[in-house]
Amino acid sequence: MSEAMIEVKNFCKLYDNFVAVDNISFTVHQGEIFGLLGPNGAGKTSTLESLEGLRPPNGGTLWVAGVDPAAAPHKLRNLIGVQLQSAGLPASITAGEAMKLFCAYHGVAPRFDLLDRLGLTGKRNAEFQGLSTGMQRRLSLALAVAHEPPVLFLDEPTAGLDVASRVELHNLMRELKEKGTTTILATHDMAEAEEMSDRVAILLPATHAMNALNGLAMGGTADFYPWGSILTLFVGGLTAFRLAWYLFRWDSQSSERRGHPLMALLALLPYAAWLLIV
């Protein structure tokens, strides 16, 4: 197993009395694309922003490339690349100026080639406020990877992108992975998470339970469960409902039980077949 680049242990995040993230733990290894899957409001962004040093945790410990984001966020400067849901760039800054500014901050030469690659050819002198939503997100991505950071955080990176830009983003992610970049991909797109991630975790808004769904290339850990387990629970619950229906249903007019044991037995067959499959 490769070196752990990101470690989250018993992490909690609160906003006043609202629990946004409750006691989650996971580890991301070097060169891994780790998918953080969940609906809006599940706590994906709160988790990422705490790992990026933008918000302090209310409990637990966080480590990114050997750095505690809460204690020394300034040390993460050249270690991470971040694409936020909202870029926050000045409205009048041009795409070219933004690239020069970000690269100067990180001490590298401007990467105008990334603007061309991500479909921003001819937009170098266009102001940020004049770019479409998709173009703004592509610019944010180019700025995030320009200094080739060892750790990359992507928060809903394909939202607002057209098909061609989405494909180019995925290709770029794969290239960065080959170079050893560790990526956390936060998304609510299950197809994207399955396609791009070595492992995927679900963050649920109600219980905030963390379950890994797919140990594709790296394999799972003790904290995580495979797709088959989740689907088995679903099929099992459906079977239990059908079993109760066939055994205990009543005739509303005669007030007599109409359930039949044979039908209940037949209800178990799909579940038995599913257990053989998984």
Image (cartoon, rainbow, N blue to C red):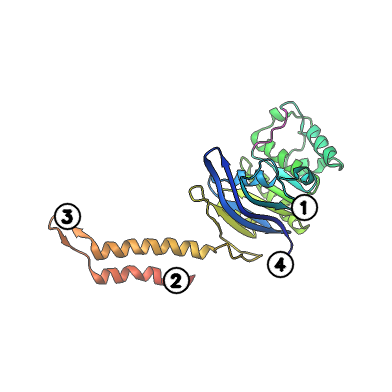
Circles 4, 2 touching at the beta carbon (< 8 Å):
no
The residue located at (27%, 69%) in the rendering is: 263
State if disc 3 and disc 1 touch (CB < 8 Å): no
Q: On the image, which quarter does residue 191 sit in? A: bottom right
Q: Would you name the residue on which mark 1 appears?
A: 150
Q: Which mark is residue 246?
A: none
User: Which one is earlier in the sequence, the residue at label 2 or at label 3?
Assistant: 3
Q: CA distance from mark 1 to mark 2?
A: 41 Å
* Image vertical order of residue 51 relative to residue 98, above or below: below
Q: Is residue 66 visible?
A: yes
Q: Tell me the kind of residue under disc 3.
A: Ser
Q: Judging from the image, what secondary structure is the residue with disc 2 in? A: helix
How packed is label 2: few (under 14 Cα within 10 Å), some, or many (20 or more)?
A: some
The label number, if any, that marks residue 275 in the structure image: 2
The residue that mark 3 highlights is: 252
Question: How far, Cα to Cα, is label 2 from label 3?
Answer: 35 Å
Q: Amino acid at mark 4?
A: Met
The numbered mark, 3 or 4, whose residue comes first in the sequence reads: 4
Q: Which residues are magenta?
A: 86-90
Q: What residue is shown with label 4?
A: 1
Q: Residue at x 76, y 28 (%)?
A: 93
Quadrant showing the N terminus = bottom right
The type of residue carrying mark 2 is Leu
